[in-house]
Image (spheres, rainbow, N blue to C red):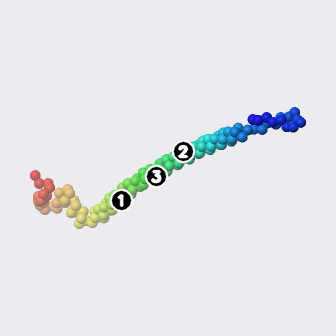
Amino acid sequence: MEIRNTANSNVSVLTPKRDSIAKTNQNESDYVAKVHQRRLILLGALFAIVILFFGSQIILSQRTYSQTNAQVEQSEQKLKKQKATEKDLKVQLNQLQDTNYLEKFIRDKYMYSKPGEQVYNLPVNDPIGQK
């Protein structure tokens, strides 16, 4: 700082030197740059945290969705098998209502015969079951 006396006055006027003004401006601009840099880093970190949070939520929901789809597909396969079994049982029930089929079924499965009838068991040609 430079001190100047004005003419016919006891008051001195302080005037800053050009170098000190330049240094002050430089210090202020350095400080402002550092503040902006800190803010940018803070905002970047905050943005990264938000992205990670929502990204993990999306991944978890996708995993849950695919597990649910797998369970639905598995349940549909079980349902198809059960419907096929039900259809076969209905056919068998209808066939058991028929007396001719019922007689044939009982004769084959339980080796029953009519009175005076002879039953013969013939070997079956089974290439896999031969010993």
Instruction: Give how far across and how far down residue 29 sits, in percent.
Output: 65, 43
User: Mark 1: which secondary structure?
Assistant: helix
Instruction: Give how far across and how far down residue 35 sits, in percent.
Output: 63, 42
Above or below, 14 relative to 44: above
Cα distance, mark 1 to mark 2? Answer: 47 Å
Q: Residue at x 11, y 54 (%)?
A: 130
Q: Specify the amino acid type for callout 3.
A: Gln
Mark toward the viewer: 1 or 2: 2
- For label 1, count other residues whose C-alpha is less than 10 Å away and answer few (under 14), some (14-19) or many (20+): few
User: Mark 3: which secondary structure?
Assistant: helix
Q: Specify the amino acid type for callout 2.
A: Ile
Q: Which residue is mark 1?
A: 80
Q: Are marks 3 and 2 in contact (CB under 8 Å)?
A: no
Q: Is residue 2 visible?
A: yes
Cα distance, mark 3 to mark 2? Answer: 20 Å
Question: Residue lying furthest top in this view?
Answer: 10
- The front one of 71 and 23 is 23
- For label 2, count other residues whose C-alpha is less than 10 Å away and answer few (under 14), some (14-19) or many (20+): few
Q: Residue at x 79, y 34 (%)?
A: 3
Q: Residue at x 42, y 51 (%)?
A: 67
Q: Are marks 1 and 3 in contact (CB under 8 Å)?
A: no
Q: Which residue is mark 3?
A: 62
